[in-house]
Amino acid sequence: MSHPHPDLSPPAPLPAGGLRVIPLGGLGEVGRNMTVFEYDGRLLIVDCGVLFPEDHHPGVDLILPDFDPIRGRLDAVEALVLTHGHEDHIGATPYLLRERGDIPLVGSKLTLALLGSKLREHRLKETAQYEVAEGQTITFGPFVLEFVAVNHSIPDALAVVIRTGAGVVLHTGDFKMDQLPLDGRITDLNEFARLGDEGVDLFLTDSTNAEVPGFTTSEKDIAPVLDRVFAKSEQRIIVACFASHVHRVQQVLDAAVAHGRKVGYVGRSMVRNMAIAQDLGYLTVPPGVMVEAKELADLPPHKQVLISTGSQGEPLAALSRMSQSNHHFVSLEPGDTVVLASSLIPGNENAVYRVINGLSRLGANVVHKGNSLVHVSGHASAGELLYCYNIVKPRNVMPVHGEIRHMRANADLARATGVENVVLAEDGVVVDLIDGVARIVGKVDVGYVFVDGTTIGDISEASMKDRRILGEEGFLSVIVVVDSVTGKVVSGPEIHARGFAEDETTFDEIKQPIIDAIAAAVQEGTTDSLQLQQTVRRVVGRWVNRAHRRRPMIIPVVIEA
């Protein structure tokens, strides 16, 4: 991973009275958010999320933050604070709890409920949990925490104020400033301003939408668009969105009731999360509107609405299966309407467009962010960020949550409002707040930790490179048997290939050069089979690059007989 300060060395021990900030994920990418705060020898963690793999991560299910820098100090962790219930903020928690199972968990009611179902899925026994709400204060060791209501694309999101002897830190989590939210719970700008008057020493701000001018559109503006889609559609409607977007699901339920349709959920995470949201009162389900998804098929098409997972093109999610005609009970018909009511997470574009093309090929009318207002962001745009900088008046700013371009844009906004000290860090870059000044003091090694099935962290970047080569360039194995006395080839070369033309004669022209190269190597005194294998690899590699413009993985096997 590239850093703005690649030559940084590991930081010196934290001076007494200072606060250290160590981002282990989420700075330089949209996902796997995790930040560690250190004060007086104790640690506080804010968020512990996952990153979803992209096309260049073949075979990977999830990507975790790198726990290595704190692995030897987990006994010093006072608590894990979760700002909200999205996967990119809570999804890696079970993996952290496998390493120390009794870390206290702090979060709002919905956040802890969503996490609880995840912990049960991982068969982890529940650790001490502290349910908090806006306006509350709770202390863990030297950290005094206060919570502030913020509006986001999931209910019950919180910003966190961290007070220590080093000063006051305000961490926004993910937030926006929707003035007409569905649940009436707005970002508490009054509290932000009060904290500003008191003095905020370090402001960690969500950067995801910093490049977008103006203010983020209100969630309520989607309702008339959904209403038009429902009014126009004469057949089944399928709406795909994030499995945790309670407000988006609420709007779909309301539109379904208004147009006399029944609704079914498709996708395990959607069914689970919406049951939790309904039980806790965050989702209002009008009586008689919900049916089991499989039973929807008994109704006429113009009475059906499916709310599905898979808005990011995830290959195993319900919508992807539908687009490939291999979902176990939903078969798309020409004229069906599919609404993609979510954003495009950077890196997922190709997967989403593949799904849209698949749906279009089946005759579906696809409504998405590119052609209708069926999604609004959950993140503050540039105008909102400027507003926050002006009322918080922070002494130091550290942009978080976003790719490098987002964090740079956020830094520019902070400077434009007069903030003199803006610290641009990335994952692993350590920032100390000492005597009211934040500065970069070093860097710890962090990388991607890949989860592949039940395997965690054993897949290196080198293994990932091998997978990419196998997927893109193919595979060649060359087996040669040589006489252990004379060094002459007595059998082979036998060549097996994947990802090349099926014609068996493809490799005929390279067989003699392999024999000649082995003979020449033996003549020069090479008898070691490993060195002969390298000779075979070089000859085959040059040939295949020249003849086929490919760089496959080549596995030479030289057997002495």
Image (spheres, rainbow, N blue to C red):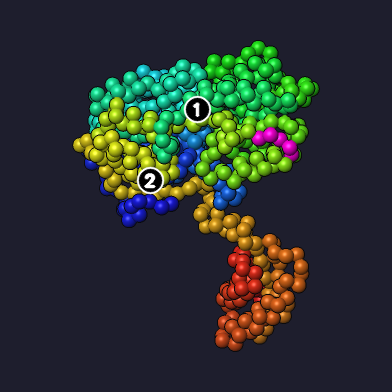
**Secondary element type, mark 2:** loop
For the record, the magenta segment spans 362-366
Front residue of 534 and 368: 368
Task: Answer left or right for 91 relative to 515.
Answer: left
Which kind of residue does numbered mark 1 sit on?
A: Ser
Residue 462 seen in render? yes
Label the magenta part by its dominant secondary structure.
loop
Q: On screen, 38 above or below 144? A: below
Which kind of residue does numbered mark 2 sit on?
A: Glu
Front residue of 275 and 125: 275
List the residue tagged with mark 2.
426
Alpha-carbon neighbours of circle 2 within 10 Å: few (<14), some, or many (≥20)? many
List the residue tagged with mark 1.
153
Looking at this view, name the residue that lies furthest to the top. 287
Residue depicted at 66% across the width and 66% down the height: 476
On the rendered image, what quadrant is the C terminus found in? Answer: bottom right
**Disc number lying in front (1 or 2):** 1
Q: Quadrant of residue 140?
A: top left
Question: Where in the figure is residue 214, as x and y percent of width and height?
Answer: 41, 32
Q: Is residue 363 magenta?
A: yes
**Secondary element type, mark 1:** loop
Question: Where in the figure is residue 539, as x and y percent of width and height?
Answer: 61, 76
Counting residues from the N terminus, which is met first, the one under dot 1 or under dot 2?
1
Q: Quadrant of residue 500?
A: bottom right
Front residue of 430 and 419: 419
Question: Where in the figure is residue 277, as x and y percent of width and height?
Answer: 56, 20
Question: Where in the figure is residue 96, as x and y percent of width and height?
Answer: 47, 37
Residue depicted at 67% across the width and 67% down the height: 477
